[in-house]
Amino acid sequence: MFKRTAVPPVGSSDHQARQPLNMALDPIEVVSFHCRQAVVLGSAGFAMFLGYAAWLFGSFWASDNFSVWVLSIFLVLAFLALVASPIQFLVRRFPKYIGALVGAISGPFAVVVALAIRSRYSFTFERYIQDFALFHVIFAILGGAHGVMFRNWLMQLGRKSDGSLISSVGSN
């Protein structure tokens, strides 16, 4: 299930590009990776939000911080599963910095789409971009970090499966 052949990375030799990966993506391993990423990146996003709130309002502590932390983990999990990982899978053959850049762009894109779905207001710069600038920045950082970690995870899967570096992942 999920077996695929190698896609040539940018600047690879023909011999390296034609080698099959012989790698199956185990669904349990994929879910496990995304759950770990959601906890790590969701916690990082929650910490960035708390830091911003503390900077803006002084000391910030609320009785529902745990609930907000859990909510941030689920929001990041939805972002990873619906936006970031599919995009990273599509650009896996490009160099690593392209993956990080596309990940950073996917964060603000996801924020705008979520606001467009959940909002009944007209689409204006102030409403969607300026008022939610913090969320654009946070999700851009999380998307870029996920882009790098997703690429490293694919490389580790390739090393586990056949002992060589996965050839569908771009270098640099």
Image: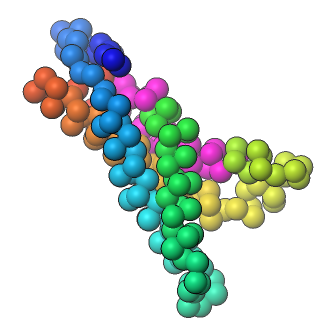
Between residue 119 and residue 102, name the one nearer to us: 119
- Whether 94 is drawn above or below 3: the answer is below
Between residue 79 and residue 131, name the one nearer to us: 79
- Whether 63 is drawn above or below 162: the answer is below
Residue 163 is left or right of residue 89, and the answer is: left
Question: Can residue 126 be seen from the camera position used here?
Answer: yes
Q: Residue at x 67, y 62 (%)?
A: 133
Q: Residue at x 59, y 90 (%)?
A: 58
Is 18 a magenta residue? no
Between residue 155 and residue 10, name the one nearer to us: 155
Magenta segment, principal secondary structure?
A: helix
Residue 94 in the image, given as x and y percentages of width and height: 38, 28
Please state the total of marks drawn on the protein image.
Answer: 0
Residue at the left extreme?
163
Q: Residue at x 56, y 91 (%)?
A: 59
Q: Residue at x 70, y 44 (%)?
A: 113
Quadrant housing residue 19: top left
Coloring scheme of the render?
rainbow
Residue 127 is left or right of residue 45, and the answer is: right
Residue 148 is left or right of residue 112, and the answer is: left
Residue at the bottom extreme?
59
Residue 77 in the image, given as x and y percentages of width and height: 50, 49
Quadrant that contains the N terminus:
top left
Residue 17 in the image, given as x and y percentages of width and height: 25, 13
Residue 11 in the image, given as x and y percentages of width and height: 29, 21
Question: Can residue 169 be seen from the camera position used here?
Answer: no
Range of residues picked out in magenta = 89-112
Quadrant that contains the C terminus:
top left
